[in-house]
Image (spheres, helix red, strand yellow):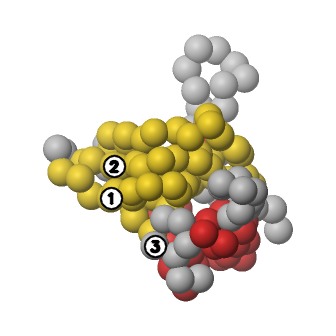
Amino acid sequence: MRAVLQRVDGASVEVDGEVVGVIEGEGLLALVGVTHEDTEDHARTLARRIAELRILDGERSAQDLDAPILVVSQFTLYADTRKGRRPSWNAAAPGPVAEPLVDLVVAELRARGLTVATGRFGAQMRVQLVNNGPMTILVEAVG
């Protein structure tokens, strides 16, 4: 599993004109991708890393600051662009594999007491954010 984390001063996600997830103030936007070999252990590791990574104000973590997190599933994080002009999506896990693992990341973050908003799995989403920094980091969960 991998996540692209962006330090934000607010973010929201919209589906069909309806805002389905929003965070206000300093927090994180986590774009989460899943590949075929990922497990529940990977999801737990990724959640821990998202919660504890010290990239917010004063080199503190979301856990330290009780900062909100917006989690959005994004299969395109496993795009393969090495050949041709069209990405291959073969490395991205299918919905029945990926959705429960993204849900587990969210559950693990909430179990740590964090406020977590989400997008809608598999939907065409419009994400708005104010990137603070800019600060964008790739985090991977390896077994």
Q: Amino acid at mark 3?
A: Thr
Task: Identify the residue at image location x=64%, y=73%.
Answer: 63
Task: Identify the residue at image location x=72%, y=56%.
Answer: 58
Earlier-in-chain disc, 2 versus 1: 2
Answer few, some or many: residues within 10 Å of disc 3's Cα (few below 14, many 20 plus, some between 14 and 19): some
Q: How far apart are the two marked residues, 3 and 1, measured between alpha carbons?
A: 11 Å
Q: Position of residue 126 (x, y in %)?
A: 33, 40
Q: Amino acid at mark 2?
A: Val
Q: On the image, numbered disc 2 is attached to which residue?
A: 13
Task: Identify the residue at image location x=23%, y=53%.
Answer: 19
Q: Amino acid at mark 1?
A: Gly
Answer few, some or many: residues within 10 Å of disc 1's Cα (few below 14, many 20 plus, some between 14 and 19): many
Q: On the image, numbered disc 3 is attached to which residue?
A: 115
Foreground of the two, 90 or 50: 50
Earlier-in-chain disc, 3 versus 1: 1
Q: Is residue 80 above or below residue 123?
A: above
Q: Secondary structure at mark 2?
A: strand
Q: How far apart are the two marked residues, 2 and 3, measured between alpha carbons?
A: 15 Å
Which quarter of the rendered picture does the C terminus lie within?
bottom right
Q: How far apart are the two marked residues, 2 and 1, measured between alpha carbons?
A: 5 Å
Q: Secondary structure at mark 1?
A: strand
Task: Identify the residue at image location x=40%, y=65%.
Answer: 117
Earlier-in-chain disc, 2 versus 3: 2
Q: Position of residue 115 (x, y in %)?
A: 46, 73
Answer few, some or many: residues within 10 Å of disc 2's Cα (few below 14, many 20 plus, some between 14 and 19): many
Q: On the image, numbered disc 1 is attached to which residue?
A: 21
Whether residues under marks 2 and 1 lie with C-beta atoms below 8 angstroms apart, the answer is yes
63 on left or right of 111? right
